[in-house]
Image (cartoon, rainbow, N blue to C red):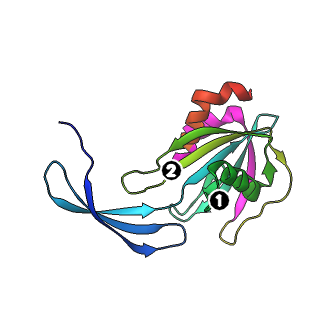
Amino acid sequence: MSLKPWKVTSAKTDKSYKVFNLRTDTAISPRTGKEHNFFILESSSWVNIIPITSQNEVVLVRQYRHGTRDITLEIPGGLVDKNETPEAAAIRELSEETGYQASEVICLGSVYPNPAIQNNECYSFVAKDVVLAGRQHQDEKEDIEVVLRPLADIPRLIRDREITHALVLAAFYRFYMEYQGKFS
């Protein structure tokens, strides 16, 4: 059997929130000919960035996440603003969340966070030789603690479930598979 795209017969934005829209698509299965509704979260692209100091320390952030109602250990990241490139968004998020700036930024690629129900991509970057250049600029809904950890500790932090965010894991996977040698 050869898979074919489903024919979308209608798409309607049901509700709009600050960070996403809820859209209902109605589509016809090419296999059965039956029509079904699908609920899609429309969002801007996201970014995250692995900041590494010249001492091979990773600048991480701890913050409370309402979805899991828990404090997580992550890398800086956030939404790509309208008319902003993913790289510019990653540099901005690094500065806002940590106060650090990078001398070099390399794109690690992108992933679809959940293509079953979301339409966006998450771009990952690595920043080389970051330095503390100012203070954090958190918004009213953020309480972020900056934490430095040796790059060599990251696999253990992942293995011991201290780092559990799937998009952070995807970024580190790309880093270790393709770029680690450029930062040692």
- Relative to 154, is 137 on the left or the right? right
Residue occupied by mark 1: 63
Quadrant in the picture for the C terminus: top right
Q: Is residue 3 magenta?
A: no
Does residue 165 appear in this view?
Answer: no
- Relative to 179, is 149 on the left or the right? right
Residue appearing at x 60%, y 28% in the figure:
178
Which region is colored magenta? 143-168
**Residue 37 in the image, given as x and y percentages of width and height:** 26, 64
Q: Which amino acid type corresponds to the residue marked 2 in the rendered image?
A: Glu
> CA–CA distance between discs 1 and 2?
22 Å
Identify the mark nearer the N-term, 1 or 2: 1
- Relative to 107, is 122 on the left or the right? left
Using the image, determine if residue 4 lies above or below residue 43: above
As rendered, which of 154 and 167 lies closer to the eye? 167
**Residue 130 in the image, given as x and y percentages of width and height:** 80, 42
Does residue 64 appear in this view?
Answer: yes
Which mark is drawn over residue 121?
Answer: 2
**Residue 156 in the image, given as x and y percentages of width and height:** 61, 35
As rendered, which of 57 and 35 lies closer to the eye? 35
